[in-house]
Image (cartoon, rainbow, N blue to C red):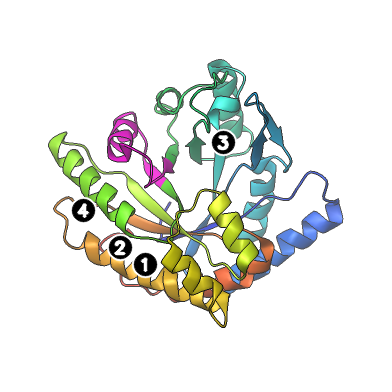
Amino acid sequence: MKGGIVFEVIPCTKSASEAYARKIIDKITNALEGMKNVTTLNIPEIVEENHLGRPYYKNIDTREFGLKLRERCGREIIINTVVVHHNSKDKFEQWLDESISKFGIKNFVFVGQKINSFEYPGPSIIEANSIAKNKKINFGNIFIPERDNEADRLISKTASGCNFFTSQVLFESDKIVNVLKEYSRKCNEFNLKPAKFYLSFSPVSNSEDIAFIKWLGAHMTEKTESRLRFADDTGKESINVIIELVNKIFSFLDGIDVKIPVGLNIEYITLHNLELAKELVNLLADFKTENYLN
């Protein structure tokens, strides 16, 4: 995946009519035509879990949706899958082989379990990485800055073959710069080539967006939340917050010993923020990050 910006696109729900699905793809395609430096589309797997940890998929197959977008837009695609929800390690490998041979997919993100106390049927992240390692594909894992011992987790995943990480949506810099600093130090200590990081950002336009993005797991301080909630224009202010955050993170990256390649993953979370996300992409497209985005 070349280029600095990945754009995250949410697949349609299964209940959507074919006409509505085409309308959504048209809307996304039109927005992409006005975006600079977006070469890859990141397609998350939207899945809910019940109290037993069993999955419910309310959106269409990410691979089918991704294929339609790739045909329309000519962009590379990244397909996400929650590996623990596959029925076994063998079933996961079958899904992976089918994704490669039937759908022509070469980029994946493997997502782990939500609840540590559950026993899921599918492979762990390290097991999934091991299965994928020899298949000549590009695969990544998830980066959660607020999680305990995250640098150690990142090192373990890098050693198991992970090529890149995508983060949760970010609104604060402290946790991420601390983890990246520790990851850089450990890569040097263990003589590991650092994986690439795609840092995720999403504009928000109202209080419901803020509540939803926090529910999804994004960390936001009271100061940032108040700044957004009481702004004259929450959408514009969220873009200002993100630009400031990106500047802080890349200024920090200039000072570490082991250079970590970093790109940007821009999301819109809900469709009404698509135009805001487009504006954010274009503001960040010319960001001076040549040392990191290649």
Rendered position, 89 above or below 263: above
Which residue is labeled 2 in the image? 249
Work out whether residue 250 or residue 51 is closer to the camera in this orientation and state it. 51
Q: Nearer the viewer, mark 4 or mark 1?
A: 1
Say which label, 4 or 2, has the lower sequence index.
2
Q: Is residue 153 magenta?
A: yes
Could one spot residue 103 in this view of the protein?
A: yes
Q: Residues within 10 Å of mark 3 (few under 14, many from 20)?
A: many
Number of the label disc, if any, that sits on residue 259: 4
Q: Which residue is rendered at x = 52% and y = 30% of the image?
A: 115
Q: How many marks?
A: 4
Numbered badge on residue 245: 1
- Please rate how many residues cluster around mark 4, counting C-alpha atoms within 10 Å: few if below 14, some from 14 to 19, many from 20: some
Coordinates of residue 98 in the picture (x, y in percent) = 61, 29
Residue 232, position as x, y percentages in the image = 56, 83
Which region shows up in magenta? 142-165
Query: In screen coordinates, is 54 left or right of 199?
Result: right
Residue on which the image places disc 3: 81
